[in-house]
Amino acid sequence: MTQPVYPPLPFQPSAPDSPGWPMPASVPPGMRMELSRARLLDSREAEFDNWMAMLHERYDECVATLGRELMAVEATFLNQEADGSWWMYHFQLLGEASPGLIPDNPLDQAHLEYGMKTKHRGWEELQPRFFLCPPAVRAAVEEAAAPRD
């Protein structure tokens, strides 16, 4: 039995200056919930694995960057689509005032370099529709994403 052949999935990243999707009412005020995806460059799956291994090895350094980025939660996934292409998905819950990645240290510089040699530039932004968590988790998320004085 032969496998079906699917046409390549297009990758259409959002403009860098895009304001992003409006947040659903269930997202705490002052926060953004984002699910982004990017296509990996051809034959870069092993490099993606190296990238994730580097982040795991330097986990404590990663955690130390969260406060200044106003980042409450981050998660990264890998998926092979029906056309055979590999895509990374990145979920984040962050404060609206987040400056994003600040590559002024060796960890974030390495993080940025891995991204440049592993994935296509830019991200497609999926539209957020609903957020749900217990009150104690919601309070912790809001605190983590609040601007520091």
Image: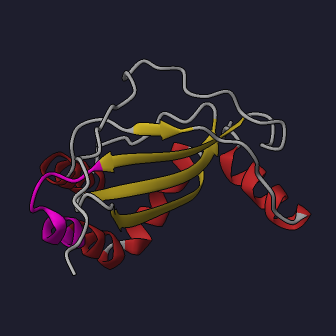
Give the magenta part as a residue range: 39-50
Q: Residue furthest left?
A: 43
At x 21%, y 59%, the residue is 5
Q: Coloured how? A: secondary structure
Position of the N terminus, as image quadrant, is: bottom left
User: In the displayed structure, would residue 40 be above or below residue 137?
Assistant: above
Q: Nearer the viewer, residue 120 or 32?
A: 120
Q: Nearer the viewer, residue 123 or 64?
A: 123
Q: Position of residue 9 (x, y in %)?
A: 29, 45
At x 71%, y 33%, the residue is 23
Q: Nearer the viewer, residue 109 or 114?
A: 114
Q: Residue furthest right?
A: 135
Q: Decide whether residue 45 is among the magenta residues.
A: yes
Q: Nearer the viewer, residue 20 or 101?
A: 20
Q: Decide whether residue 6 is among the magenta residues.
A: no
Count of numbered marks: 0
Q: Position of residue 42 (x, y in %)?
A: 11, 55
Q: Position of residue 134 (x, y in %)?
A: 87, 66
Q: Residue 15's quadrant in the figure?
A: top left
User: In the displayed structure, would residue 69 be above or below residue 118?
Assistant: above
Q: Tell whether 51 sits left or right of 59.
A: left
At x 22%, y 65%, the residue is 48
Q: Position of residue 127 (x, y in %)?
A: 60, 38
Q: Residue furthest front?
A: 1
Position of the C terminus, as image quadrant, is: top right
